[in-house]
Amino acid sequence: MMDRQKIVVFEGDGIGPEIMAAGLDVLAAVTQGTDFTYETEFLPFGGQAIDQVGEPLPNNTINQAKRADAILLSAIGGPRWNACPKRPEDGLLALRSELGLFANVRPTVVADSQIDQSPLKGEIVRGTDFVIVRELTSGAYFGEPRSKTFDQAIDTMYYSRSEIERVMVYGFDLAQSRRQHVTIVDKSNVLATSKLWREVGQAVAQRYPEVTVDYRYVDATAMAIVADPTQFDVLIIPNLFGDILSDEAAQITGTIGQIPSLSAGATGPKMYEPIHGSAPDIAGQGIANPISMIKTVSLMLSQSFHQDKLAKQIDEAVELTIRRGQVTPDMGGTLTTKEVTEQVMNAMQEGV
Ligand code: ATP
Ligand code: MG
C-alpha cells in the first residue's frame, strides 16, 4: 500500500467549482479499488479567499500548500474583484514564488478526434504532440526597475544564469522521457537576456548527448507552430515569449477548454491547472467544458504520482467521449458539464 497522498484543492472562481467537481469525480472513480489512496484538502484562494478573509493568499493556505503532495487549481479571478487592493491574480503570482514554481509545462496534443476542431487543416496538424516549457518566475514579468509616468514607461527583462539553467535542465530531462528533441527559443539576435538564454542552453545540451537540439528565434517559432506543428517535441522558452507562444499553441487544438498545465519547482509539490481563466461569462450555467480539469487530474496522476496507467484510462475515456461528440457547446456539442463528466466516467467503465 502506498502512503495516502495529500492533494490540496483550490476550487477557484467563476466556473472553477463546477469543473473542479468534475475533475474530483473522475479522480474518485478512476482510483476506486486501486492502491492509490488520497485525501483532499479544500483551501481558500483567489477571489473566494478575498470574500472570506479579505486576502487572496491567506497564510494558512500557503503553509498547507507547501505540505501537499500535489496541488489542484481550477481558475481564479473575475471582474468582481477588479477594484480590490490585492486581486486574485496577485495571490497566484505570490503562490508561484512561495512554492518556487519556475517551470510552466503545457502539453499541446491534437488527438485524431480533434483534427476537425483545429483551425489548421488535416495532415498539417495530425500527430501534433509537443510540450512548451515556459520559464515562470523571472524575465520581463518580474525584472526591476519597472515604472510608468504619463510620458514614459520602463520594463526590465532580466535573467540570471542559474534561473536559465534550472529551467533548461527541466526541459532536457523532460525531452529524455519523450522523443529526445529540444527547441530552444529566444531572440538572441537582439536581446542580451536571449544571448545568455542560448549560451546556457548550449552548455546544458552538452550534458544530454542523446537529445537533439534546435535553436530558433521566437518570431520564426511563431510561424512554425502553425505551419508545421508536428516537428516539435519540447520547447524551452523565456517567460514573456512563452506566455504568447503557449496561447498560440493552445489554439491549434481548437478550444482552450481542454488543455491542462503543470508548474514545477526543483523540489516540493507541483501545481496543476487548466490553461483557461475562470470564464465568468458562462459561470453558473452548467455548460463549462470539464475536459480541461479532467485532463489536469490525469496530468497530476502521471507527473506527481507516477500513476501512468490511471492517467491513460482517463485520457482514453476523454478521447472516446470527444469522438462520440458528447461534448459541451464550446466544442460544438449540447451536453452540460455534468453530462460530459458522466460520459467520461461511463467510458472508463467500459474499460476502453
Ligand atoms: P484569464 O485572464 O483569467 O486568462 P481570459 O480573459 O483569458 O481569462 P478565459 O476565462 O480563459 O478568459 O475565457 C476565454 C473564453 O473562453 C471565454 O469566452 C470563456 O467563456 C471561454 N472558456 C474558458 N474556459 C472554458 C471552459 N472550460 N469551457 C467553456 N468555455 C470556456
Ligand atoms: Mg487568458
Image (cartoon, rainbow, N blue to C red):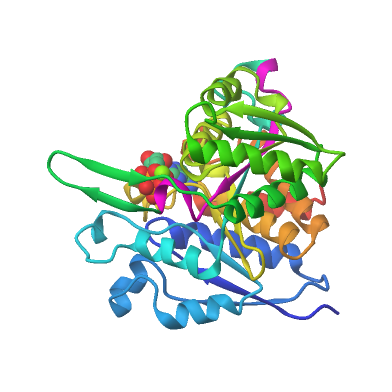
Residue 200 in which image quadrant: top right
Ligand 1 sits in quadrant = top left
Report the number of discs. Answer: 0
Q: Is residue 226 magenta?
A: no
Q: Residue at x 68, y 31 (%)?
A: 113
Residue 68 image offset from top left, x and y in percent: 62, 76
Q: Residue furthest left?
A: 150
Lateral position of residue 190 relative to residue 279, left or right = right
Q: Residue at x 78, y 58 (%)?
A: 310
Residue 47 image offset from top left, x and y in percent: 34, 66
Q: Is residue 19 above or below residue 199?
A: below
Residue 211 or residue 296, whichever sits in front:
211
Residue 352 image offset from top left, x and y in percent: 81, 46
Residue 62 or residue 221, whichever sits in front:
221
Q: Where does the N terminus fall, quadrant-wise? A: bottom right
Q: Is residue 125 magenta?
A: yes
Q: Which residues, given as a range, are shown in magenta?
A: 123-142
Residue 86 visible within the image: yes
Residue 334 visible within the image: no
Q: Is residue 311 above or below residue 213?
A: below
Residue 250 or residue 214, whichever sits in front:
214
Residue 238 image offset from top left, x and y in percent: 53, 42
Q: Is residue 51 above or below residue 233?
A: below
Lateral position of residue 262 relative to residue 77, left or right = right
